[in-house]
């Protein structure tokens, strides 16, 4: 099992066209056998306006097969021409391949409990420091998120992308105010802070580094799966 995260940066003023495209894409994805686990409007983050989505595959062979069908599907070519409307809608996109992180033990909750705001964080990891980063996640960060009412929908090692090694985390929060409060509380949580201080003092170097953040609003109704897993 592995995942593909795509973040599409749209031309200025073209968000409505991007949302119109994503309203119609699910039917084409389903027709081609593409397993789309979640779609979001990036409400805040670098290079907006932007749309993000996560796909799931059993292996690379399946990925090649389903996207081969997609790119020859007449519905996609019609939709692309319609939503481009004479000018390219997408300015650039980032693509990341992900595999589930060893510390992630997904459990499903009711979609209605996921809340309205999801957060994507891409963490840098020190070279050769994945094991130490995982200890920090397992012993400090993930328990703190759970205590504060967050729900980790995906935690994955980034295996391809523009900056490696890295880790991707998608967390659901009740609403914007909840996210704001918990973002501050996570940065000042005693256990998290103590682990980070110990990490900085370790002569082998920092394990979990800085992160890029996106605030996500689910496009789907119903919301994306409570954990981005599949059978």
Image: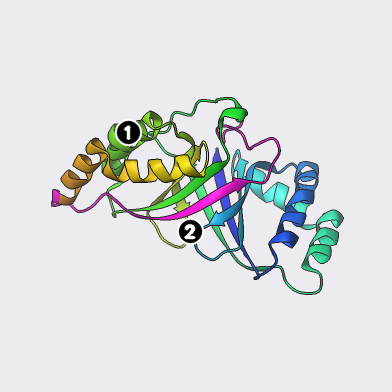
Residue 199 pos. (x, y %): 19, 46
Q: Is 113 situated above or below 46?
A: above
Q: Nearer the viewer, mark 1 or mark 2?
A: 1
- Residue 181: x percent and y percent? 40, 42
Vertical comparison of 199 with 226: above or below: below
Res 156 seen here = no
User: Of residues 206 and 196, which is closer to you in this image?
Assistant: 196
Quickly name the residue at label 2: 161
Q: Position of residue 225 (x, y in %)?
A: 61, 34
Query: Is residue 228 magenta-colored?
Result: yes
Indicate the position of residue 60 as horizontal and vertical percent values. Answer: 60, 46
User: Circle 1 sits in a helix, a strand or a loop, which is it?
Assistant: helix
Q: Residue furthest bottom?
A: 87
Task: Quadrant for the C terminus, please.
Answer: top right
Q: Is residue 75 something that shows in the picture? A: yes
Residue found at x 48% / y 58%: 161
Instruction: Please name the residue shown 26% across and 40% down the image.
Output: 192
What's the residue at 70%, 66% (across, down)? 14
Task: Look at the magenta stretch and give its main secondary structure.
Answer: loop
Tell me: residue 98, above or below residue 81: above
N-terminal of the pair, mark 1 or mark 2, is: 1
- How packed mark 1 is, by other alpha carbons closer than 10 Å (few <14, some 14-19, many 20 or more), is some
Q: What segment is highlighted magenta in the picture?
A: 201-230
Please say if 225 is above or below 187: above
Residue drawn at (56%, 49%) of the image: 216
Task: Answer with the quarter of the image where residue 102 lies.
Answer: top left
Q: CA distance from mark 1 to mark 2?
A: 24 Å
Residue 86 colored magenta? no
In this picture, residue 225 sits left or right of residue 31:
left
Say which residue label 1 marks: 138
């Amino acid at each position: 099992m592995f995942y593909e995260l795509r973040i599409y940066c749209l031309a200025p003023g073209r968000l409505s066209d991007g949302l119109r495209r994503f309203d119609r894409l699910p039917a084409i994805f389903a027709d081609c056998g593409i397993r789309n686990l979640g779609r979001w409007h990036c409400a805040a983050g670098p290079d907006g306006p932007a749309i993000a989505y996560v796909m799931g595959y059993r292996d690379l062979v399946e990925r090649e097969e389903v996207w081969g069908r997609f790119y020859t599907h007449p519905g996609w070519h019609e939709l692309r021409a319609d939503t481009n409307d004479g000018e390219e809608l997408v300015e650039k996109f980032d693509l990341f391949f992900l595999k589930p992180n060893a510390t992630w033990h997904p459990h499903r909750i009711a979609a209605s409990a996921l809340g309205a705001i999801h957060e994507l964080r891409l963490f840098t990891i020190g070279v050769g420091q994945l094991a130490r980063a995982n200890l920090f996640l397992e012993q400090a960060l993930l328990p703190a998120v759970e205590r504060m009412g967050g729900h980790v929908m995906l935690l994955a090692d980034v295996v391809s992308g523009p900056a490696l090694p890295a880790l991707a985390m998608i967390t659901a929060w009740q609403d914007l105010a909840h996210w704001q409060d918990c973002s501050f509380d996570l940065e000042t949580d005693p256990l998290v802070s103590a682990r980070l201080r110990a990490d900085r003092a370790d002569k082998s170097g920092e394990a979990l580094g800085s992160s890029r953040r996106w605030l996500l609003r689910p496009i789907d109704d119903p919301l994306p799966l409570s954990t981005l897993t599949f059978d």
